[in-house]
Structure formats: C-alpha cells, structure tokens
Image: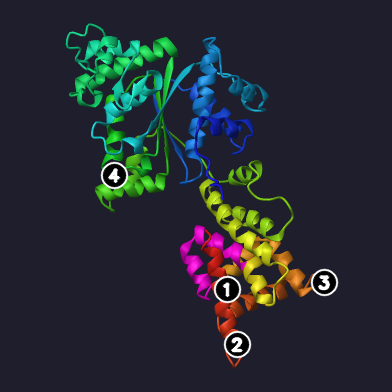
Amino acid sequence: MKKLDLSPTEENILLTLEKNVLGRNEEIKDFLGIIDNIEGNMSIAINGDWGCGKTFYIKQIYEILNYMRNQKFDIENNKRIEEIVKKDAYLSKLEMSNSFVPVYYDAWLYDDNDDIIASLMISIIKTYGKVYSTKVVTSSLLEKVASVLDIFSFGGAGTLTNAIEKNQVKDILDSVKTSEEIMSIMDEIFNQLIVEKANKLVVFIDELDRCRPDFAIRLLEKIKHFIDDDRIIFVYSINKNELCHTINKFYGNEFNSTKYLNKFFDLSFELNNSTSVDYVTNLRLINNDGYYINILIFELIKIFSFSMRECNKYIQGTYKGVDIVRNSSNNYFDTMERHVDTLFFPIVAALKIYNNNIYNKLISGDGANELLAIYEKSPTMKKYMFNILDDKDSITRDDNARKEIVKIYETIFTDKYKDNDNNDSYRNKERIKRLNMLLNKI
C-alpha cells in the first residue's frame, strides 16, 4: 500500500493550496494581512500539536509571499501559483502594501551545529544563492560578504568564480568567528536581500521543538541578541508544550519554561487540528461508499481530533484490516467475530493511536465506561447497535443499546459470559487473536 503521508514538497504545497485541502486558505490570507501591518521587527509563534500541519502551513505562506513579491516587482510567476491565487475565494482578495523575502530554516537540520547564526546565514544564502552543502558557489551577495569577512581564500585566483573553479572556497561555518563578524555579515546579507528583492524579510524557523534542548535555547537567545533589524520578522512554528518540556530538560522541572518562552514571542497564534476533516475529505482518503466501517473511521477521526499525521497512520493501518474484513463479510460463523471486525477493530485501532492508556484498558476488559463514552459521541455506533437490537421503541432502545454494547464487549474481552465447558473461553481467544491480527496491520 502506498504511504499516505504528504511530504511538504513544492508540488504538494501547491496541491494543498489549489484544493484548499487543509481548509486554511482563509487563515493564510488573514495571517498575511497581519504580517503586512507589522511595524518594526517582531517574533511570532505559530503553535500546534505535532502532526497538525505546521510545516505545510508556513510553506504555503512562503509560496504566497513569493508570489506577492514577484507581482510587486513585475517578475513572472509560476503559472500554476498564479492560477491558484486568482481562482481561490480567499487568496484572490489578498492585498499587501509591503513586499517580503521569505526564508525557511529547518532548525532540526542544523541541530548538531554549534554555530547557530552561521547556519541561519547559510540557510538564507541557500535560498537566494546557489549553494552546495555549506559551500557558497555563486552570488553577487557573497562578493559583498567576502569583502566584509575573509571567508574566501582566493590564493591568487583573482575572482570568486576562479576560486570556485579551483575548489578554493572555505567552509562558511569555519569562517565566522566573533560576534562583530557575525553581526557584520548578517547586516550585509540583510541589506542586499532587502534592498534588491523586497523591503522586508520573513524568516520561518521550523521544527524547533524537535531540537536538542541546548540548541533550541541558544537559537532563541542568539536570534534575540544578534538580530534586531526593523525590517525582519521571525515566525517560529512550534509545539509549545513540547518546547516547554525541552527547556525544562535543560533548566530543570522547577523552571518556569512558559514564562521564559513568552519573552521571545511578541504574538502567538494557535493552529488546531480541526482541518483534519477537510484534509481527509478533500484528498478523499476514505472511500465514500456508505460502507459502515468507512463511516465509523471518519467519525472517529472527528471524535479524537486526529492530526494530519495521525489521520494518515490510522487510515492506512485500518484499511489494510478493512480489506480483510470485506473478504470475510459473507463467511461469519460467529456473530461475535463480526462484532470484532466491524465494531471493535476501528475503535481499538483509533485508541491505539489516540491514547495508549485507554487502549490498554479497553483490550484488558476494563474499558466498558470508555467504550460507552465513545458510543455517546458516535451516531454510527448507535445505528449499528439499533440494527442489532431491531428495537423500534425510541424511548427504550438507547438504554438497551448501551446495555447490549457492554454485554458484547464483556463477552469478547472478559470471561464473564463463558460457558462451563470453556467453549466460549476458546472462542474468545480466537476473537482476540483475530483482533490482534487486524491491529498488527497498523
């Protein structure tokens, strides 16, 4: 089966914008309006759970910023992004007074690098100059940089081009030595980028909460210390809870990591998982064929507010099991086995991803209350139980359905209803074995 996870490639970023797969195009428009009205420098946090699509979100913003800048400077845009913006109900209404140069910095990629500011500088140069690894190989920008620092050892080569051809380029990371040099070279980079390409710079810092504690802290501190240019806006995509844990690992559990983080961010925006339903629907990740399990899977995604990543894992894993269930649908000799397949498998699979404690409680036979809590939120489960009972009395059937689902659960997961000759005990082992076989597909 093909892996469902969408990598944030340029093609997929454009696809998600074009179809508004994540349901965030209006949010992107509003965020860019806020960015455009910022006076001076500012640090912004975009906070969201792991897997909720933060990287997609900031890369979508990155693409739109590039498009708007090209429009302002009469630079020809990629035809596809032009069509996407013009046709979108929200993005087509976007107007910006300022032009921005966007830069994407993957903090996790540089996690093992001691020189944080130099790695940030290289990330900027990689975006707007031709770079191999950490070796700068061309750009008029770097001619200016080279005049400020002795980054390039030409050895009589005469020009930067000749130096490149003779492999006489020194590694930038080894060249930036002092605070004064760092600030000087950053000024040169910012001045030329902003003067030539826009009037403001937006630097997106991604994956900070995945970094080593010491690296994450030093990055925040150094950017705050070294970069205080009114033309620069920093946007951090973070999982604040995880980043707080990271900071506490460094300073200790008694340290007020929330207060510490707040001093770095002037604004904070929440990115929630509510768009997962749009994501699943727009990409048609679940078959819309009316099949009971498909409906229940979609419902459980909403009940548990799965992130995009969790949706992918859940759907991909359950669909392997669904194929087995479909092939068995006309060959059940055991009614309880049918319930294992069509009722408990999707629920237990969702809990395996959502909450391991509830998952363990359910499969150990001690999760009747947790099962009923899910039942109360699931119209599909209710319909399933009403069909089993064939109870037409609207007053009694809901109560009867609750009792019946608990009885089915306890029959399968406990020995409460086993007979004297242990036939039921044997059958239960076979049912649990089958459930585990389906769950192992995840």
Q: Can residue 396 be seen from the camera position used here? A: no
Query: Does the magenta-highlighted stretch encompass residue 27?
Result: no
Confirm or deny contact between disc 1 and disc 4 (CB under 8 A). Answer: no
Q: Kindly indicate the quadrant of the structure image that contains residue 133.
A: top left
Q: Which residues lie in the magenta part? A: 344-367
Question: Do the CB atoms of the residues marked 2 and 4 lie less than 8 Å apart?
Answer: no
Residue 366 lies in the magenta stretch? yes
Tag 2: residue type? Asn
Tell me the CA gap for discs 2 and 3: 33 Å
Residue, disc 3: 392
Disc marking residue 368: 1
Q: Earlier in the sequence, mark 2 or mark 4?
A: 4
Q: Residue at x 52, y 15 (%)?
A: 70
Secondary structure beneath label 3? loop
Residue found at the very far right of the displayed protein: 392
Q: Upstream in the sequence, badge 1 or badge 2?
A: 1
Q: Which residue is mark 4?
A: 213
Q: Is residue 377 above or below residue 238?
A: below
Closest to the camera, between mark 2 and mark 4, is 2
Residue 103: percent from left, percent from top: 41, 25
Seen at 17% across and 12% down, the residue is 155
